[in-house]
Image (cartoon, helix red, strand yellow):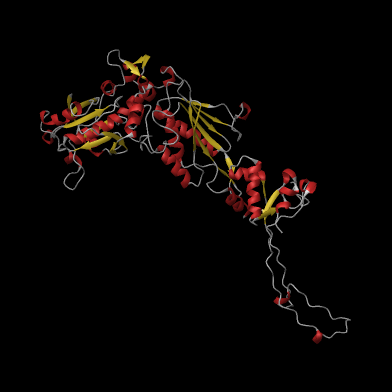
Amino acid sequence: MERRTIPASDALALIEREESHFWDHKSAQSKGTVVQKIAAGLANSDGGEFIVGVEDRGKQSVGLDRWQGYSSIEDATIVLEALARDIEPPVPYSIEYLVIQGRERQGLACLVSIRKSESVHYTADKKVYVRRGAATHSITGQAVTDLSLAKGARTYEDQLLADYDKEDLAVEDELAFFLRSYSPSTPPDIFIRKQRLIDRDSGAAKVSAGILYAESPPAVVPKRCAVKVARYNTKEKEPRREHLAATPDTIEGPARVVIDETIAAVTDLIESVSVLQPSGEMAPVKYPPEVLKEIIVNAVIHRDYNISDDILVYVFDNRVEVRSPGSLPGSMTLHNLLQDRFSRNPTIVRLLNKYPDPPNKDIGEGLRTVVAKMAEARLQSPIFTIEGNYFVVELGHTPLARPHEIVMEYLENHDEITNSTGRSLTGISSENSMKDVFYALRKAGKIEMVPGKRGNKSAWRKVQVQVQPADPEGDANDLLEPKPSTAGSGITAQQVEPPKRAVRAAPKRLKERRSATGPARNQPCSCGSGYKYKRCCGQIVV
C-alpha cells in the first residue's frame, strides 16, 4: 500500500474518466457490499481499476470538488476488508492512496487495481458478479458453471520471455508514448511493476509486455505474431499463388501500431477493387469504417499468441477474409459469439484500453457492431467460421437484397442480363442457382429470354409489352376489330352492322403443362435458349 500526492491535473483526469468495462468510481460513503460487488466483477472478468472517494457528477459536485475522500488510511479500512476478507476467495488486488497536491483537506481516495483471476469469486452474500461494459451484473446457474470452466485456461500472454527484461521494457518508445497520457503520472519502472508486466524475482518481462510495447514483438516473442495482408485477383475459395496481385505486406510493431497500419493497408487494397453495382456501374468497394476496425482489433487482441503464425488478411475480388490464429477461447462458441465474451489475453485487452483513443473502446460490442454496421450499409452479414485452429471472419461485397430484387434493379437501367453478370451482382457462385432465380422471375411474368441468344450467350430481359398504335382517324373502340370493307360487295354502308365494342381480354393462363412427351421433351427448345424443351418452354403455361 502506497500513499502518493498527485497534481490537480492528474486528479481531474481520474475524476472525469468515463466509466467503462475496466474503470469505475465510487463514493467514500459506499458500503462494503458495493466495493465487494465491483471488485469481484472485475476479477471474474478481465480485471480493471476503480477509485473510492469520488462523488457522482451533480449540481453541488463538479470538477475537483467531486474528490471527497477519507480523512485517514484508518477510515478507509472498509475497502481493505471488502477486498481481502468479504470476498471468497480474496481477489488479487493492489491499492494506492492518493491525495491532491494543495487540496489535502479533501481527503485521500483509494485507487484499487484488480487483476483477472483464475478463480470464481463470490461476494459475502454468495453471489457471482461479472463486468459487462460500464455495469456490473449478477450471474447464476449455467453461466457460473461456464465461467468456472473458462477460468481454468492459462493464457500464454503471462509466459516469461527469455531475452527481454524490465530494463529493455522500461526504455521502449511505445511505453514512453503511452505513459505521456497515463493518469496518474507514473514512471516506467513503477508502471511495469504495478501492472505485473514482469516477474518480480527475475525481472523477466511477460509476453503481454512484448506484444504491447516492444518495437518489434516478433524479435522478442518466440512465435510468429505479425500481420500479413495479401491481395488475390480471384473469387475462388481456394486461391493459388498465381492469383497473388503482389508480394504480401508484413506489418510488425506494438499492438496499437499494428492495428492502425493494418487498417490503413487493408482499406487501400479494398478501395482498389471495383465491383459491379445493381445500378450497372462499376464502383470501388466500401465497408463502414467501424467494420474493418472491429474485425482487425478483434484479431489482434484475441488471437492465440501461443500459435506460431501470423494473422492473415486476404482481399479477394468478392470478399475480405481475416484469419486469426486460435480457436474460440474459454466458453465461447459460434452460437454465443454475439451474446457472451471471454478474453484470451486480458492484460493486452485491458492495457490497450488505457490509451487516450483506445482501439478497443467498446468492450464486448465489437462483433455486434460489425453485424449492425453491415446491415446499415445494406451489405450481407459477415460469416464467422472455425477452420482448423483459426477463427475466420468473411466480409462479402454482396448487397443485402434478394437476388430477384437485384436482377430487376439491374434491368431498370439495362436491356438484358446474363448469368455471369447476375452472379457478379448477387454473389451466387453456382450457374444453376442463378438460373433458378431467372426461372422464378420468368414464372412470375417479370422477365423472358432474349430471342436468338443461345448457350453461354443466353440473356434475359424484362417482359416486352406489345402496344398497338391508335388509329388517329378511327374511333378508339375500333382498335382491335377493323371495319369491314363494302367495296364491290353490293352492300351499302347503311346495311353493315356497326362494329361491336372491342373488349381486350386478359391472356388466360392454364395450370396444365403442354402434353409433350417422349424424346421431344429432351430436344433443344425451338425458342433458341439453348436449354432442353422440358426445362424451357415446356414449363410455360398456355
Front position in the image: 351 or 476: 476
The quadrant where residue 125 appears: top left
Q: In which quarter of the image is residue 413?
A: bottom right
Q: In this view, does 69 lie to the left or right of 396?
A: left
Is residue 267 left or right of 529 when viewed as pictured? left
Quadrant where the image shows the N terminus: top left
Q: Can residue 415 be seen in this view?
A: no
332 left or right of 460 in image: left
Residue 103 spot, x, y in % from top left = 13, 35
Instruction: Please tell me which residue lies in front, 305 or 69.
Output: 305
Residue shown at 69% from the left, 54% from the top: 448
Q: Which residue is drawn at 18% across and 48% down?
A: 59
The number of numbered badges drawn on the structure is: 0
Residue 387, how many percent across, how many down?
Answer: 51, 29
Question: Quick check: 417 above or below 6?
Answer: below
x, y percent for residue 21: 31, 35
> Looking at the figure, which quarter contains the C terminus?
bottom right
Instruction: From the top left corner, tell me how far across and down residue 89 is, in percent.
Output: 23, 25
Residue at 70% from the left image edge and 52% from the top image edge: 539
Residue 200 falls left or right of residue 483: left
Q: Can residue 300 be seen in this view?
A: yes
Judge by depth and name the residue closer to the eye, 471 or 147. 147
Answer above or below: position of 212 versus 426.
above
Kindly identify the residue that appears in the image at 13 percent across and 36 percent down. 106
